[in-house]
Amino acid sequence: TDAGLAAEKLPVDPVESAPANDAGRDLMSKFDALIAERQALIDTGVTDPFAIVMEQVTSPTEAVIAGRDTILLGTYNYMGMTFDPDVIAAGHAALDQFGSGTNGSRMLNGTFRDHIEVEDALRDFYGMSGAIVFSTGYMANLGMISTLAGKGEYVILDADSHASIYDGCKQGNAEIVRFRHNDVEDLDKRLGRLPKDAGKLVILEGVYSMLGDIAPLADMVAVARKHGAMVLSDEAHSMGFYGPNGRGVYEEQGCDVDFIIGTFSKSVGTVGGFCVSNHPKFEAIRLACRPYIFTASLPPSVVATAATSIRKLMTATKKRAQLWDNARNLHGGLKALGFKLGTEKPDSAIIAIILDDQQQAVAMWQALLDGGLYVNMARPPATPAGTYLLRCSLCAEHTPAQIETVLGMFAAAGRALGVI
Ligand code: PMP
């Protein structure tokens, strides 16, 4: 599949669509195709799916959108930590004690008490000796990949990798080799063609965010080791609920990986990114990594909420069980209704519904929103194999009654539009 190619592109590539005539002197004219495409979508009368405003957020699973109470089924708030009273209290206290921002890089005056606290919490959560916090997960990938693999070395990545992984490759100077999504044999073949002695970094993801499918990490890590490669796994979409300690798919499958990338923007319920590792020289990354050095550090209130949330996630067994129940119920219910889903079984908290074309996807999305349900709409080139998706992501805090309501809405919209 070439789906992963898509992950590094915008819906319309501005450079490729730049006119070759005089209009090209206006640097903004390269966006004409993008503007026209968006306008064509709006002209169909649909609410702009990429300009939704949360007027109020009343719980991890509910918001007011366009004046209407809406169930949220598209956020990455998997463990529902955003309204946890301890998390909120930690944020308030840090705001009061340390002010609103750090006004500097981690390298200079931007390391406060709670940056250290959150890195300690991450070391404990993952049982690893090293933890480095970045301002977002995007920057963690950008920084780690471009810093780890340099000139004459190789990055080997899954074709369906997240855009931040592709961008990390672009920012660095290593040679880039792509293998077919989740294809262990292809990974083996491609690694086998590379110079034996060259440094190699294989990049995998525990859960792939478009279809919600998981990687055969154990087999892939074994292949990477056979060829002497180091391994980085992005566990952004598995933290908190995969593996005995909620560390991710790599933990569930018993893999030994060199670097784990994660984010605070999903299960942790705030914003920020990180890398954890047992490598004895890991701290050196702080001295060489541009996306770590040349940007402001996270505000004290954010790192304080993250530290509290991560520590609570270490024992959140009840929430974990609720999330998996919700995933099973929604997946089973949608399958029974006759929808085509991204995975055979509920592999993660992401459940993707595959639709025939843009028109069908937009009509379904709009019908659900009008009924009081928000899901994500995703379309090529961000999706694999040219698919149009409605992506549902579950929260531990969704109640069985909400899941019932959601299934009723899908049934009604699906039947009215002839999807099922
Ligand atoms: N990695 C993956 C696999 C992701 O899906 C995302 C965000 N959706 C990121 C990294 C970036 O995380 P952040 O939102 O913290 O920038």
Image (tube, grey):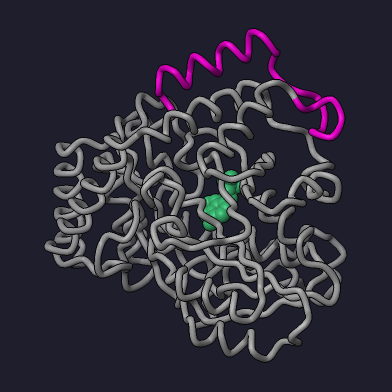
In this picture, residue 116 sits left or right of residue 43: right
The percent position of residue 205, horizontal first and vertical second, equals: 51, 62
In this picture, residue 176 sits left or right of residue 223: right
Asked which quadrant contains residue 319, the reply is: top left
In this picture, residue 335 sits left or right of residue 230: left
In this picture, residue 317 sits left or right of residue 185: left
Q: Please say if 340 is above or below 74.
A: below
The percent position of residue 28, horizontal first and vertical second, equals: 77, 58
The percent position of residue 221, horizontal first and vertical second, equals: 53, 71
Asked which quadrant contains residue 158, the reply is: bottom right
Quadrant of the snapshot with the C terminus: bottom left
At 65% across and 42% down in the image, what residue appears? Answer: 131
137, 126: nearer the viewer = 126
**Residue 191 belongs to magenta span:** no
At 26% across and 37% down in the image, what residue appears? Answer: 398
Q: Please say if 196 is above or below 268.
A: below
- The magenta segment is 82-111
The percent position of residue 46, horizontal first and vertical second, equals: 39, 52
At 49% across and 14% down in the image, what residue appears? Answer: 89
101, 192: nearer the viewer = 192
254, 143: nearer the viewer = 254
